[in-house]
Image (cartoon, helix red, strand yellow):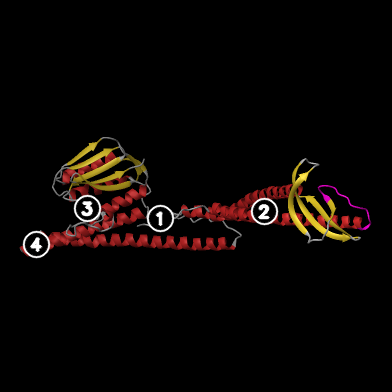
Amino acid sequence: MAEAETKRIKLIRKTSQTFLWISFILMLVSTIALYFYVKNLMLTEVEEELFSTKARVEAELSKGSGQFSLAPVVEVANVASLHAEILKDTIIYDPSQDEMEEFRELISFKEINGEKYKITVRNLIVESEDILIAIIFSYIIIILLVFAFLFYFNKSRNQKLWLPFFSNLEQMKKFSLSSPEPLQLVESEIVEFHELNKEIDTLTQKVRTDYLNLKQFTENVSHEIQTPLAIIQAKIDNIINGNNLNDIQYEHLTSIQKDIQRLTQMNKRLTLLTKIENRQFMNIEKVSLTDVMAAIIENFHEISAAEIKYDRKNEIWAKMDPHLAEVLCTNLISNAIKYNTEKGDIEVTAKDKLLSVSNYGTAPLSHPENLYARFYRENEGEKSTGLGLAIVKRICDLYGFLVGYEFKEGKHVFSVSVDT
């Protein structure tokens, strides 16, 4: 089972997402920390004020000012015994507001001038909560404004910083082995980008040099092989046409002659395949595949006994090299003739941008996934180069066509879908 394809994401977007998440987490943590810190700070201040008020009340009582109360803020009462000091939150009625309010309350017991007193001081903490909320809200607003500024500043800065990289990436996408033009890489003050440019330049020069050497080698080998093969073929023809051969010698020479013809054909097809893969066919024209197929079928009528029926429903146009259009149609027809087991009619159909060629067969192919591999033959006993369909596939890949195969109603059907 194939692994799931990794979801791709742009670099700027990825770095921006990282910035967003880190900023969000920091803002959340800092807001919570600020909330509890300010709350604790304000609570401490309230308690300090309570103790300060209690001390002032005790001072007044020490002066003999008598009992006094200011409900619900200050209450002084005589008690029979002293108890421990109590500090707590409480909810009591506030007559000034005519409602229940939350207070921070300090209850202290003190003996002053021989009298035992219960001193209760309170401070309204609702207002402190409002102040706390206002502080947190203001903090969040400031943080969001700073965050928005830093985000867009960071994004624009990153875009400017990575601009040479993206520009050079576009140059790499346009790189062609067949073009002599050097890459126009954008220089950068960033050390890593500068080193990357040097490595790209070195690598592309090496690849182009290797490509030219391999191209020259392939052309030379192809050319040099043709001459000795032609000479051998001519000499064998002369020997066969002589009168001094017995039947065994004749059979051997005929077999050699067929092998030489097959070798010659293989050499030509390999050369063609190499040129296709190296994108050496640059002559792009608007070609009528239906017209090309009609001409190829007419040629096969002259050299083959197979009956080819051509159902031309729609005109199919394609932007491609005219020579490769002929090769494409020729290979499809020759493959159908070669493997037409029942020697029945071969059907060619042109309809709705789909060109299909079908021939009779006894059974579906055992390994259709290998159809377009070089030198693949379904039947090892079959004398063929195994390059015809490989060339068809490379031509289709070159121009973005889709090539397909299916076994339908006792026929092998090859189709080429042309997106014009």
Secondary element under disc 1, as helix, strand or loop, is loop
Residue 71 is a magenta residue = yes
Dot 2 crowding, Cα within 10 Å, few <14, some 14–19, many 20+: some
Q: Which is more N-terminal, label 3 or label 4? A: 4
Q: Nearer the viewer, mark 1 or mark 3?
A: 1
Residue holding disc 2: 31
Residue 128: x and y, percent?
A: 76, 49
User: What amino acid is labelled 1 in the image?
Assistant: Ala
Residue 70: x and y, percent?
A: 85, 48
Main SS class of the magenta portion in the image = loop
Residue holding disc 4: 250
Residue 365, label in figure: 3
Q: Is residue 85 left or right of residue 233?
A: right
CA distance separating discs 2 and 4 = 99 Å
Part of the protein shown in magenta: 62-74
Dot 4 crowding, Cα within 10 Å, few <14, some 14–19, many 20+: some
**Residue closest to the eye, 91 or 310:** 91
